[in-house]
Amino acid sequence: MKKEDVPQDPSALVGVTRDVCYVKDANGKYTTDLSIGWDVKKQALDNAWDDIHERVKEAALKVKNGETSPVNYFMELKLMDLTLLSGYTGFWKWTIKRHFKPSVFKSLSESKLKKYAEAFDISVDELKKFNG
Amino acid sequence: MDNSILPYKHIQTAHCENGVATGLLRHHGLDFMTEPLMFGLGSGIFYIHIPFLMVNGGPAISYRSMPGWIFSRASKLLGVKVNRKKFSSEKEAYDYLNKQIQLGNPVGCQVGVYNLPYFPPEYRFHFNAHNLVVYGKQNGNYLVSDPVMETVTTLTEEDMRKVRFAKGPLAPNGHVYYPEDVKPVSKEHLQKALYKAIQRSAFEMIHIPGPIAGVDGIKYTARQIRKWRDKLGVRKAGLYLGQIVRMQEEIGTGGGGFRFLYAAFLEQASNYVNDDRLLKVSDDFTKAGDLWRASAVQMGRIYKGRLDDQKYYLECADMLDEISEIEKNAFKKMREIKPR
């Protein structure tokens, strides 16, 4: 890539930092330049976030309809999956899946709820009261 | 603990691990170290597409070697020892870091980015192999030199605990590291190290067994792309292509999936060993990097929704096949380059 071809498309980086790019200068030697973003990757990131928001919305709807528990919703909201949530809580993945059932979730002990609340960085109350 | 600011010089680099390693070695007197040299000496260039493994809902693709390897391999070639510590106890990890600051030793820390407050929210995923340097403490906050940031920053004790003990794949477990016994490196020593590192990268990219890694891995991805539209549907296929582009171009690769960075390394290496054969191979990697970026543009047209036809997926795949060939030839040339 040539120095004059470094894209400068405003992205989420603006105001925070800029990307270091390795580019060729006018003499054909390598140097670095800073970029505030590139449209092509901004769109990729935006699409990834659209997908996340959609999954969160779906999970909220399922909680509302009584098909899943708030654990499932907050897992999606915090960009986690079963492996990650298992890492943070110490519960087995299949245990977490069980806790997705609203009936099982209702009977969870305070100490278990606390583990989830800590993993999601919310209060136990927020976790219990979420209803879609 | 009282205020202490260690005389560490912040450097901004494309990639965090290169940056921490380069900065720390410079701090210990190896002033010649640059990001491209670190990346090349550590044989950072690589390609792997791990089947069945998903990262953030997309294919698991990497353009570089395993986290941590770059610093370890480069150090070994330079005769530097890297002291690494991981912890099961958060208290011990906390005490150890403070102790290093008191001893006047800036250290590298492996952290998760999800809870890094100074990162743009859009970039805060559960990725646990980020690296930064802690170079002091002031008013109870850690002084942080994060190589992907333009300037230095700070983290509270609580932020630091969270990022050092992020959980999940590649969990850092408080991982702290720093170089030890750093002695001056002679020109002859460096020349030998450069040739060795170049041979190692060439060997790995050509001869690593199996279809998913090295230059063959790029063709593996091409074969997958040809199937995605029919198998996954347009929406998901678009997300998968987006994931490839993000792994290739997101903060940290210097553009073109580290290929420009590697081309810059070969250019610097050719000066040290006075061997213009390396310059020619450098041009090959510039070409490969340019083509990687062209493929990203083409993928972008698809996931922006402008192009929707199988033939465009095939075009992307063909570009990857071509890249694989260019890189294969370049690495083959490198295999032939022995010290004169």
Image (cartoon, rainbow, N blue to C red):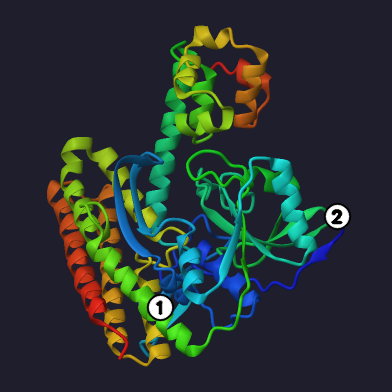
The image quadrant where one finds the N terminus of chain B is bottom right
Q: Residue at x 53, y 79 (%)?
A: B33
User: What x and y, as percent, mark residue B222?
Assistant: 19, 53
Residue B257, can we see it?
Answer: no
Say which residue label 2 marks.
B1
- Horizontally, residue B333 falls left or right of residue A42, namely left
Q: Secondary structure at mark 2?
A: loop
Q: Is residue B1 above or below residue B149?
A: above
User: What x and y, as percent, mark residue B96?
Assistant: 73, 52
**Cα gap from disc 1 to disc 2, whole angstroms:** 41 Å
- Horizontally, residue B65 falls left or right of residue B127, namely left
Name the chain under label 1.
Answer: B
Q: Is residue A78 above or below residue B145?
A: above
Q: Nearer the viewer, residue A55 or B140?
A: B140
Q: Secondary structure at mark 1?
A: helix
Q: Is residue B230 above or below residue B163?
A: above
Say which residue label 1 marks.
B265
Q: Residue at x 70, y 72 (%)?
A: B8
